[in-house]
Image (cartoon, grey):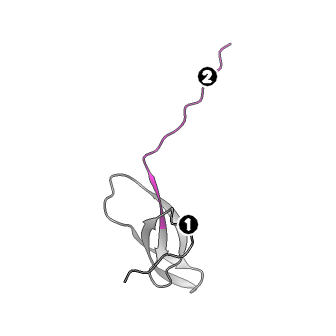
Amino acid sequence: MAVKAKRKKTSKRKIVGLVCEETGLRHYYTTKGPEVKEKLRLLKYNPKLRRKTWYLETKKNLGRNEVKKKK
């Protein structure tokens, strides 16, 4: 009896981090499809400020939890 090899599911979705616009900390990660060109901007709960704030998309692989502020 032959054993079927399982297919590896590949996805073109990209993992992105969400950084808070007020504190600069990254608390959330989500996926984004290749057809979406603009950056995500979502209203999410910030546990540090204990209220909802705006989160903006950034790269996932920045290494640390804090993101450098733009000048």
Q: Secondary structure at mark 2?
A: loop
Badge 1, how many Cα within 10 Å: few under 14, some, many 20+?
A: few
User: Residue tagged by mark 2?
Assistant: 4
User: Residue tagged by mark 1?
Assistant: 63
In the picture shown, does residue 2 fall above or below 71? above
Q: Is residue 15 magenta?
A: yes
Badge 2, how many Cα within 10 Å: few under 14, some, many 20+?
A: few
| Residue found at the far top of this picture | 1
In the picture shown, does residue 40 fall above or below 6? below
Magenta part of the protein: which range? 1-17
Residue 64: image x %, image y %? 57, 70
- In which quadrant will I find the N terminus? top right
Q: Amino acid at mark 2?
A: Lys
Alpha carbon of mark 2 to alpha carbon of mark 1: how far?
39 Å
Whether tag 2 and tag 1 are in contact, CB under 8 A, the answer is no
Residue 61: image x %, image y %? 51, 62
In the picture shown, does residue 26 fall above or below 7? below
Q: Is residue 46 magenta?
A: no
Label drawn at residue 14: none
Q: Amino acid at mark 1?
A: Gly
